[in-house]
């Protein structure tokens, strides 16, 4: 298998070639780094969000949409599937890079994280890579400038001209799509936090509703987290039994049943003050290879309807 960043770069090339069709903007900065606007100064789009989700996971996931209903209202849902969950979801797709300069703040996801590999999950998976390119997707409310891309390049150990940063805001069509793809990632990461070997997760499939696009970031953060915690459904195939599978779901959290706008307001929107267990899918099916199939959690259409204004 090629490096995660090399595979992601091929998808970035596709995004550049079809920028007009994807309704994204491409900016080559003065330091020759590349910033792709997937949904900051542009509204973003469904196809842009699907491709960005593939870029974040280095092309190791299949991503698509389907229609379903919430409280009798037809809504788009996003589905993902991968046979490489540890690599695609944890070593690439997870949002674990806090990116900050004097004038910029964002949260990075994507295979560039594997070039740094400072997060504990890389030790758990036993993965780190070197590459001539670095690909990072950044959730932010302003486009990165040269200082930001230079910081990415320096930390990833690549030339500035080899840094590709895809930017999107949560309050964009792209943001709603990318957020909805995270149900499987949350389940696999939560399992790893509980002590399960992430390499024993053989495949992961998931779906979540597409949250209505908000006008501002706080509302978007609340809606997209509600989409996962109250509408996210995950199917995992794993190698071994585990006595804490039920703790993977959002239903295991003390605040289950409260919309995220209330949860965030209770801590003055200080994201870091919240328990990690809050960020989990609503329902998980765990199929133990050669063993039992377990189902935990439940979806809650009433909370989704309130959050989405249905």
Image (cartoon, grey):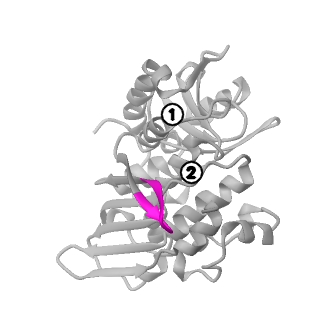
Where does residue 216 sit, x and y in percent of width and height?
74, 47
Write the residue at 39% across / 39% down. Answer: 4
Which quarter shows the C terminus? bottom right
Where does residue 153 sit, x and y in percent of width and height?
60, 29
Where does residue 22 sit, x and y in percent of width and height?
48, 28
Q: Which of marks 2 and 1 is nearer the N terminus?
A: 2
* Residue 293 visible, this angle: yes
Q: Nearer the viewer, residue 61 or 70?
A: 70
Residue 74 magenta-drawn? yes
Read off the residue under disc 2. Answer: 95
Residue pushed farthest front? Answer: 72
Q: Mark 2–mark 1 contact, CB under 8 Å?
A: no
Read off the residue under disc 1. Answer: 135
* Main secondary-structure element of the magenta-colored stretch: strand
Crowd class of label 2 (few under 14; some 14 to 19; many from 20; radius 10 Å): many
Residue 92 sits above or below residue 161 on the image: below
State which quadrant residue 288 falls in: bottom left
Q: What element carries label 1?
A: strand
Q: Is mark 2 on a helix, strand or loop?
A: strand
**What separation in Å lies between label 2 and label 1 (alpha carbons)?**
13 Å
């Amino acid at each position: 298998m090629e490096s995660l960043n090399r595979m992601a770069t091929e998808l970035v090339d596709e995004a550049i070639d079809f920028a007009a069709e994807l309704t994204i903007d491409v900016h080559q900065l003065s330091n020759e780094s590349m910033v792709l606007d997937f949904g900051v100064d542009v509204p973003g789009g469904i196809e842009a969000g699907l491709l960005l989700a593939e870029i974040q996971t280095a092309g190791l996931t299949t991503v698509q949409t389907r229609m379903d209903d919430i409280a009798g209202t037809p809504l788009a849902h996003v589905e993902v599937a991968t046979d490489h969950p540890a690599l695609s979801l944890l070593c690439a797709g997870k949002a674990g890079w806090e990116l900050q300069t004097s004038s910029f703040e964002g949260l990075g996801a994507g295979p560039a994280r594997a070039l740094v590999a400072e997060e504990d999950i890389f030790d758990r998976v036993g993965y780190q890579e070197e590459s001539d390119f670095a690909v990072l997707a950044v959730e932010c409310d302003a486009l990165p400038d040269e200082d930001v891309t230079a910081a990415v390049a320096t930390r990833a150990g690549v030339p500035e001209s080899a840094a590709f940063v895809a930017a999107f805001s949560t309050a964009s069509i792209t943001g709603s799509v990318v957020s909805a793809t995270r149900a499987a990632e949350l389940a696999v990461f939560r399992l790893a936090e509980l002590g399960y070997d992430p390499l024993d997760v053989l495949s992961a499939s998931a779906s979540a509703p597409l949250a209505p696009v908000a006008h501002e970031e706080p509302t978007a953060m609340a809606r997209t987290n509600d989409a996962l915690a109250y509408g996210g459904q995950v199917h995992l195939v794993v190698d071994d039994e585990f006595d804490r599978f039920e703790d993977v779901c959002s239903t295991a959290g003390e605040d289950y049943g409260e919309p995220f706008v209330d949860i965030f307001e209770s801590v003055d929107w200080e994201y870091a003050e919240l328990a990690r267990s809050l960020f989990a899918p609503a329902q998980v099916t765990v199929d133990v290879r050669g063993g039992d199939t377990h189902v935990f959690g439940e979806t809650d259409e009433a909370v989704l309807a309130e959050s989405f204004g249905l």
